[in-house]
Image: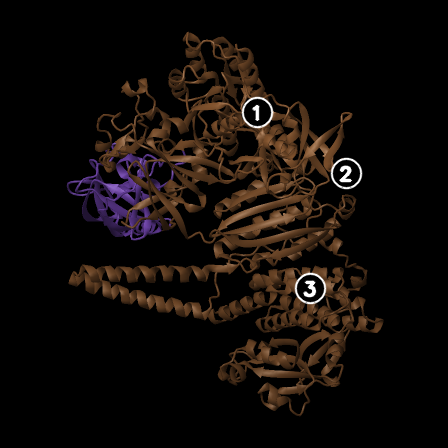
Chain colours: A purple, B brown
Amino acid sequence: MAQLEETKGHGKVVGLATFYVGKAFCGMDIQQVQEINKHTEITWVPQAPEYVLGVLNLRGRIVTIIDLGRKLGLSPTVLSDTSRNIIVNSQNEHIGLLVDRIADVVPADWQQVEPPPANIGGVQGKFFEGVFKTEDNLIGILNVGVVLKVDNH
Amino acid sequence: MGIEDDEILQSYVEESLEHLADIENNLLAIEQRGADIDVNLVNKVFRAAHSIKGGAGFMGLDNIKELAHKIENVLGLIRSREMMPSPDTINVVLLAFDKLQELISNAERSNEMDISEHTLALTNLTTASLSKEEKESVSRMVNIRLPDGRVVFTIPEFDISQATKEGKFLYLVEYDLIHDVQNKGKTPLEVLTVMQKSGIILECKVDISSVGSLEDDAPFVRLPFIVLFSTIIDPGIITALFEVEEKYIHLVTEDMMVKISAAGPPEAGPEVEKISVQPGTLETGKKPEPKSEVQEEGVQNVVRAPAVTQAETSLRVHVSLLDLLMTLAGELVLGRNQLLQTIGSGDQHALELVGQRIDLVTSELQEAIMLTRMQPIGNIFNKFPRVVRDLAGSLGKEVNLTLQGKEVELDKTIIEGLGDPLTHLVRNSVDHGIEVPDVRRKQGKDPAGQIVLRAYHEAGQVNIEITDDGKGLDGDKLAATAVQKGLITEEQARTMSDKEKVNLIFLPGFSTAEKVTDVSGRGVGMDVVKTNLDKLGGVVNIDSEPGKGTTIRIKLPLTLAIIPSQIISNGGERYAIPQVNLDELLRIPASQVKERIEKVGDAEVVRLRGRLLPIISLADVLGIERTYIDPTDGQQKPDRRKGIIDRRSKVSPLFEDDSVEHDQPGCNSESETHNLSERRTKTDRRYHASSAVNIVVVSAGAFKYGLVVDEFRDSEEIVVKPLGRHLKHCKGYAGATIMGDGRVALILDVSGLAQMAGLTSMEGTDRALEVAQEASEAIRARRDVQALLVFRNAEDEQFAVPLALVARIEKINKADIELVGGKKVIQYRGGSLPLYTIEEVAEVKPLADNKDLIAIVFTLAGREVGLLATGPVDAIEVAIDIDDSTLKQTGIMGSAIIGGYTTLMVDIFGLVEALTPQWFEDRKAVEVADGKAATILLAEDSGFFRNQVKEFMEAEGYNVIEAEDGMVAWNLLQEHAEQIALVVTDIEMPNLDGFALTKRIREDPRFSDRPVIALTSLAGDEDVARGKQVGIDDYQIKMDKERLLGSIYNYLNKGR
């Protein structure tokens, strides 16, 4: 996260790993991405928050997989051939974000990133750090910190 | 500080702490010996203080140096027998060592910490034993100068006179850290250690001031390290010792010492003499350092616990263990290479071999690595003598602490986590358990209380016991408090056992500081103790006997990282249950489900060896759909029944009601990953209603329950891994683990699950009790229950007699027993009651030699007889299987297992008859019809009772036809219609019960005139009434031979 703050200030060009959550086109700084994989051997955890799909064995670590669709308030992500887990490292813990489909890495200049509107494709603005416009698309840059915040319900 | 310095400081700190480790107990030992001083022991402590001082001087840790020095002075006086190691003295030294430890642990900040309290107290001690002249010399300071006139040290004159007496020489040695130390490959600490072997280091320091500044033209080549050293070695040969050039060794002469005024030194102010060194004032009077807020005890005389052991960041491992690890790592690499090769070749057999090899190496590696984490529990035990001594002293109590099993090893993390709870418990024992000596004397106890701290291995776990012989806990008072606080209801309190009551103190919210002492004392923050132990995977419970003492038992796993566990599966997922929590696995066959699982209110219970166990379904607790494994195709099928017992319910509208589904919120969402399509298939749900129920019996603390799961799998050793932060609030899991196939399985937390199911210990017991009562009534109505009186003869042999035969029980004093005419009697209600003992007839252990005995009074053959016995006496109602062959002998009709003991059933008739046969001779001869013996039809389903009754009827001369149930009896009656003169029948029988049989007999004109005598074990009024209604002529208690025979005689004589 600190890295992102830093890059923001300097107007540096960062690579955005982009992906689809439902129809929403999102991205995050590729520096935050540990790996992207296609594990489907997910163990369901009863009593877990709704947006937690389950846990996964990632080379000996227990990784919580979060259904990004559900977390963002969209419909649940359906496991398919294209769905992937984006593993990010947050607070010394590996967490997987399940997305419908991954797309390219898009270079983005932070100076051209605009603040997020209240709502992007049905997703609340609070989940985003900003939006980046490409020639034919609008990328919502996820605020991973907010997305991974533990709800105390 | 540079990295190098850091390292040196680190090693100094580690070494010093090591020196300090044993000091406490050594000092306590010194205190115990009193005037009988063990010089070696004192030397040991002295050397420790000395080494610490030496190093501190080099590191510039002045406070540490000073404190260590003062301690050394006191110890020096003790060693030379100039001072008595009284408890007060030792107390001051102990406290000073505590402070020293604190300083060393925070070495970098030590110079800023206040040590005046301790130096003052120590100085006081040293001066107290000195002459006036010497006292003054303590406060007189002397400057020591180098020959060039520079003052290097300022020390008390007293120290110098001590160091130079007995022909010792005082040297000032200038080491050069560069040439004499570094270049010779030594460390300053090593140099000091060598010096200490031959003398005493008074002072040392690195002389930075002599180095000069960088601006100086002369390149500095020396870094002087100056040591003031006292030794008996002659100046002539001293150079050999120091390995420094002769010009740097100075014999300290008078002209090198300059006395300065007494007022100068800050640490020995004029008020020195005034301050008393009473330990009490030191502890409670002033407390300069802000002590931890753990003082929630609210007891005014709290003694500071030694600083909480800090979590260590480094660990010492034996080299041999490290070598072993290396070897194993090597083998693992070898195994990997082989594996890769073999995979390439595709040779299945070779692959298996490699697999085995890797398996072996891995387990060995695991064991070896775990060994590095193991530490003896003595590490924490060793601090308790001090804790107990200090606390007992301040409370005016005498307490002896015994430590056992110090060598027992536990995982490092457990050892670290155990310190606090254990301290709490031990302090509680001293504070609230042990009484003051006066009280103890009055109660006839040794004025000194005993506390035993014991660790031992048992069943792969470590047990720790804290036993005291104090006043114990009063369960009733505790229960009353709990009720008062609204933690439990009065009903609950009533149904609780003593043990449960005592364990109430672990309830959260039970004890608060101000409330506890007026109730029973114990219980300060006990819930915190329990929570801490829970975290370590430990289980704690209390046994207490008021007036006798208390035992607290803690069970701990050896390690937390790898645990043996049972794998189960539910809803297609596997879960692990730690073996620690596992009591047993119970599989109830389909045919018994209805019988053994019952429903009370909305709770389900299972009958397990006569006890009722609350059960919960894992699926229900976790909010997932109940499933079961189809026995025919091994598939998982949804189970739509409301309750487990519905499986066997013959009529259940629920089966027909499709609207009853267990769709829990959140369940749908996961369907994609779980083949729910399969689960949801609308196969015939009743098709496999016959599957067995699998129950894992688990215990969470003292409380047990059954967890219903789909399937039992293997038991495995699993590696515990933490769950991510998003899952932290899921109470049902203790973590996760990775299974052999790489998938994750959750580890269940059985106490968490119980909580989620609303099944706390109290509720559980309460409900189980309720259920038990209802159930026992149900049983009574349905089955043969024997009411038995259980007692002992020898203390370890249990006996029972049918309660119905007992007239009363009398307490008698052994001294009142008279021996008249070779028979024991006791005066009783104006007559003599003959007394018998079981061993007069049967081969059993002799009656316990107690002062107080019990006479169980029976009425036999119209007389009263007493059977001598010992307590505890208990009247119970049980359905038991009596074995009438194995242990049968004269006076003993058989045996049964009651309450976990093999219990001998006393045949009181046989017993009395064997001893006084004449009593029974006046019985009327056998009733004969037509010159033959009368024939009796005996219907009884219990083989034991059938044999018993038949035996004594045959002994009377009757012919007996036996039937094992009512139906058989009815058929036999028709077969032998002419012969049978009378029917004796049990009430509770399969197929046709006693009532129905009687009814048939009465309704059939052929038999309606036959007398029917019913046998019961408990004749309830209702039963009697119903029996009379259907035509039963008489009721007799099964084992009451006398009356039954009398009744048979009467009815045969006069008919109905």
- Specify which label sits upstream in the sequence, 1 or 3: 3
Say which of B694 and A120 sits in front.
Answer: B694
- Chain ID for label 1? B
Residue at image location 47% in from the left, 40% down from the top: B699
Measured as percent of width and height from the top left, residue B105 is found at 57, 61
Q: Residue furthest front?
A: B931
- Chain ID for label 3? B
Label 1 secondary element:
helix
Residue B789 visible: no
Q: Which mark is residue B185?
A: none
Q: Amino acid at mark 3?
A: Ala
Q: Which residue is mark 1?
A: B1041
Measured as percent of width and height from the top left, residue B345 is found at 16, 63
Residue at image location 53% in from the left, 82% down from the top: B181
Q: Which residue is mark 3?
A: B29
Image quadrant where residue B325 sits: bottom left
Q: Is residue A46 left or right of residue B91?
A: left
Say which of B294 and B480 sits in front.
Answer: B480
Disc 2: CA contacts within 10 A as few (<14), some (14-19) or many (>=20)? few
Label 3 secondary element:
helix
Q: Amino acid at mark 2?
A: Ala
Disc 3: CA contacts within 10 A as few (<14), some (14-19) or many (>=20)? some
Measured as percent of width and height from the top left, residue B437 is found at 76, 48
Measured as percent of width and height from the top left, residue A3 is found at 33, 52
Residue B29 visible: yes
Image quadrant where residue B34 sits: bottom right
- State the CA–CA distance, disc 1 to disc 3: 71 Å
Q: Which residue is mark 2?
A: B815
- Specify which label sits upstream in the sequence, 1 or 2: 2
